């Protein structure tokens, strides 16, 4: 089959790599270009017509640090054990099928609000992917944890460093079962200094709740451990439910943890369904951090009714060109710490 040059196909858009490409199907039988194929973990996974059945099997076949790529074919990829996958091999890219052409510098994911390749986990407090290896890239995947306390991605370098984790153009739906411990991306307590450096979260869409009645969720991005030099950029955080969202981004290391420093939060949008009672309470919360300029916020837009930034002291978050929308003249103003 002409996988690399067929007009309109995804095959020529697989990320540039010197490694191998492994294909994962969401069901036992799957369709590619009008032909049905059987998926099996006995397959080698090296062609879209020979896909393996589980993400874990593709990870087992991949080789660390050679540029291997794992592609999730369209559909819902589900695991009943948590985490669904622990990435322990450095330098892997895990990618779904994008819903649009790749784009740069947009303020949400480069695709629809629900991407075509979906990861769910049905376990109690189930985690879809745990990253425990450096130079892991995850993109064009829709994360939909189903149980209370579920997480899309946990950055947990317990086996090795997870430096330079790169999550981009993903969508996160905190909608199935509301819980204040349900997170989109989580850095758990116990992650210490110098093992989660330079993480980048870019071009993602996070949504909490449904249009109908729904409870409160935890932060879309929740940092309880120590992360140095993390960047959160070009993303949208939207509240749809009827319960307030306490914080869209929480950078709040647990007591006794080394300080999280150098967090850059830039060019993000924070959206509410109303400007009165149903709101994101705080766009960015820094908890008990007291280090001066530990967090930097540039060019973020926050909806009316939401506090832009809360901190233990006014000098914890450095701010420039961040705007809070208004429902009356002058319809928006720069905001500071509260």
Image (cartoon, grey):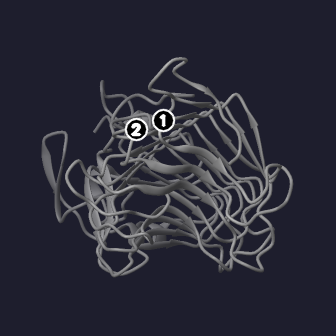
List the single residue furthest toward the right: 292
Question: Is 57 in front, or is 171?
Answer: 171
Q: Badge 1, how many Cα within 10 Å: few under 14, some, many 20+?
A: many
Q: Quadrant of residue 265?
A: top right
Q: Characterize the local packing of mark 2: few (<14), some (14-19) or many (20 or more) Cα atoms within 10 angstroms.
A: some
- 159 versus 155 height, above or below: below
Q: Are marks 1 and 2 in contact (CB under 8 Å)?
A: yes
Is residue 64 shown above or below 283?
Answer: below
Task: Identify the mark nearer the N-term, 1 or 2.
Answer: 2
Residue situated in front as seen by the camera: 332 or 152: 332
- Residue 143, given in percent of the width and then of the height, sits at 37, 57
> Does residue 136 sit above or below 177 in this rendering?
above
- Spot occupied by residue 210 in the image (x, y as percentages of width and height): 26, 52
Q: Residue at 39% across / 55% down in the picture?
A: 244
Residue 110 has which mark? none
- Position of residue 26 in the picture relative to residue 171 (left or right): left
Q: Eyeballing the image, is 313 above or below 82?
A: above
> What residue appears at the point 32 percent right and 51 percent down from the top-left corner?
117
Which is more toward the observer, 67 or 166?
Answer: 166
Nearest to the eye among marks 1 and 2: give it.
Answer: 2
Residue at the disc numbered 2: 275
Q: Which residue is mark 1?
A: 303
Residue 316: give x, y in percent of width and height: 79, 52
Horizontal and vertical percent for residue 16? 55, 39
Q: CA distance from mark 1 to mark 2?
A: 7 Å
* Element under disc 2: loop
* Residue 138 in sight: yes
The local secondary structure at tag 1 comes to loop
| Residue 34, quarter of picture | top left
Does residue 53 appear anywhere in the picture? no
Residue furthest to the top in view is 330
Task: Identify the image quadrant of the N terminus.
Answer: top left
């Amino acid at each position: 089959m002409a996988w690399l040059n067929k007009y309109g196909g995804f095959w020529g858009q697989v990320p540039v790599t010197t490694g191998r490409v492994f294909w994962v199907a969401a069901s036992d039988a799957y369709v590619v270009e009008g032909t049905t194929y059987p998926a099996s973990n006995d397959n080698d996974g090296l062609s879209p017509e020979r896909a393996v059945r589980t993400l874990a099997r593709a990870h087992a076949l991949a080789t660390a640090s050679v540029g291997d790529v794992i592609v999730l074919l369209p559909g819902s990829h589900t695991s009943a054990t948590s985490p669904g996958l622990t990435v322990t091999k450095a330098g892997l890219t895990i990618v779904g099928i994008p819903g649009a052409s790749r784009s740069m510098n947009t303020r949400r994911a480069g695709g629809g609000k629900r991407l075509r390749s979906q990861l769910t986990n049905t376990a109690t407090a189930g985690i879809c992917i745990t990253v425990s290896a450096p130079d892991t890239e995850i993109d064009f995947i829709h994360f939909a944890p189903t149980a209370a306390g579920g997480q899309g991605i946990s950055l947990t370098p317990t086996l090795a460093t997870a430096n330079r984790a790169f999550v981009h153009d993903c969508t996160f739906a905190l909608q199935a079962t509301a819980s204040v411990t349900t997170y989109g991306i989580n850095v758990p307590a116990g992650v210490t200094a110098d093992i989660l450096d330079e993480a980048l979260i870019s071009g993602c869409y996070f949504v909490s709740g449904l249009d109908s009645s729904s409870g409160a969720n935890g932060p879309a991005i929740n940092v309880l451990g120590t992360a140095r030099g993390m960047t959160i950029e070009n993303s949208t955080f939207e509240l749809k439910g009827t319960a307030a969202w306490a914080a869209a981004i929480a950078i709040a290391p647990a007591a006794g943890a080394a300080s999280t420093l150098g967090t850059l939060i830039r060019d993000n949008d924070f959206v509410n369904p109303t400007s009165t009672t149903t709101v994101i309470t705080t766009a960015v919360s820094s908890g008990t951090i007291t280090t001066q300029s530990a967090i930097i916020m540039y060019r973020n837009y926050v909806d009316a009714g939401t506090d832009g930034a809360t901190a233990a002291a006014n000098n914890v978050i450095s701010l420039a060109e961040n705007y809070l929308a208004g429902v009356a003249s002058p319809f928006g103003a720069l905001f500071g710490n509260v």
